[in-house]
Image: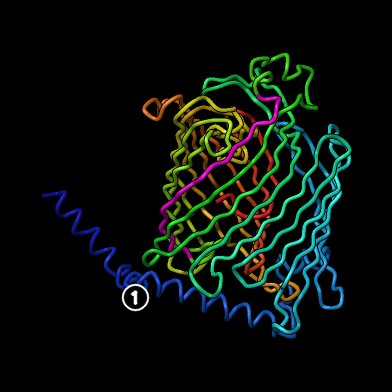
Amino acid sequence: MKKILLILLLSSLNLHSYKVQKDIKTLKEEDKKEFLRENDKKELVNTIISTNEVPGGLLNRIADKIVFNIKGNPLLFLPIADSSKDLGLNFGIMPVIAIRNIKKNGEVSSVIAPSISYNKYMGYTYAYRHYLFPTDKSLFLIRASLSDEAQREVFVHYYDPEIFKTKTRLNIELRNWHNPKSSFYGYGIVSSKDDKANYTFYLKGGELSLTLPVLENIYFDWTPSYYENMIKDGIVGKDKFSLKYPDEYSLYSNEKKFFVNRFSFLFDNTDHPFIPKIGSYIIFSMGFSKKSFGSDYDYSIYTLELKDYYNHKLLDKSITAMRFMLQWQTGENIPFYQMPTAGESTGLRMAGDGRFVDRAKMLFNIEQRFTIVKAPVMKFLTELEVTPFLDIATVASEVSKLSFNSLKYGPGLALRIVLRPQIVGTADFAFGSEGFNTIVKINYPF
């Protein structure tokens, strides 16, 4: 009886709250997204056509010091200061200029961001980034970098979620990369930090993704990719990779070819491809590599990934972002750099790149993205986010051997500047059993 009375009491207390939120909760998903789109559109238009800046405010005080007006185009100087598990401290400066299209009511049509930075292992690195936005959801990116030591990159990326004004999606990536940041620690979740060996990873090739609508919010994706990869001794540490892992080095220091056909079924009702605020994304993919098609290995890799974005009361003040991933590989043994991995750029931010490697991986991420300031800065709709997060991951030799007892935890805090409708600059600070890690990059982690 006490339990029944308690339930009735709690129900009565929540009744008023339920009535207040009823209108929002009964909205269909498409109506919610349309509400958010219209709200964003109004804010963006008001920001662009306004003649006065909002006085005061944290963002505007910061903007007064670091943003310059170049013939109506904002020029922003951003410091580069991050610390990598593999390369240590990296510092420099990155000017960012946004080019407005007068013919489109002053909307930002491209962003140019060159940079110069210094690291004790790579020396000076000179980089150039050019982002072009044909529409508010499509992206064309050109990126190039050159370091005194080892680092080289040319990267071209095009993405359009609505080609020919349909729901068909197209993604193209081309890349030639010499990456000295990679390290190998051995296999499995029990691998030791003391067994770390740095190597330079050489990659060249590309991929094309064609995503076709099947039913409402349901798509079929085909992604063929071709890459040629190899490794060489790295530039960090006294122990050479070739001496610490002679078997792996003898196998993978020669160029290996990977032609993989990946087939996916996905559900996607998120409101934006780069900075989603509501909706869900679920994908199951199957990638097949066959020697008969030009690969050096016969293997398959399967991935189940679920992402969800909950926008509290549709107010854009607090967004809960969650991701779960299960990935496993079958077939013959393949190079460690192609296997499921949990590390800095693969979901476990407190660890270095390539930290945990095996044939199966389980990953969970949750972020609470709080918008603490939203204001027009230089006619950008600009948001400042503070985001506590938690990363959880493990790897194993088989899916059946993935264990909750071997999970690695990486809590942290992220500071982000969001320039609607497309740009996110993020600084992630993560810690855990691997120590402390700092990551500065463009775009959300998921």
Label 1: which secondary element? helix
Is 413 left or right of 320, judged from the image as shown? right
Q: Is residue 429 above or below residue 340?
A: below
Q: Residue furthest front?
A: 292
* Residue 413 lies in the magenta stretch: no
Q: Residue at x 65, y 53 (%)?
A: 173
Mark 1 packing: few (<14 Cα in 10 Å), some, or many (20+)? few
Q: Which residue is mark 1?
A: 23
Q: Residue furthest left?
A: 1
The image shows residue 142 at horizontal and vertical percentages of: 75, 57
How many tags in the picture?
Answer: 1
* Residue 262 lies in the magenta stretch: yes
Q: Residue at x 81, y 63 (%)?
A: 76
Looking at this view, is 204 or 278 the one in front?
204
In which quarter of the view is residue 97 placed?
Answer: bottom right
In which quarter of the view is residue 234 placed?
Answer: top right
Is 433 left or right of 115, judged from the image as shown? left
Range covered by the magenta-colored residues: 252-270
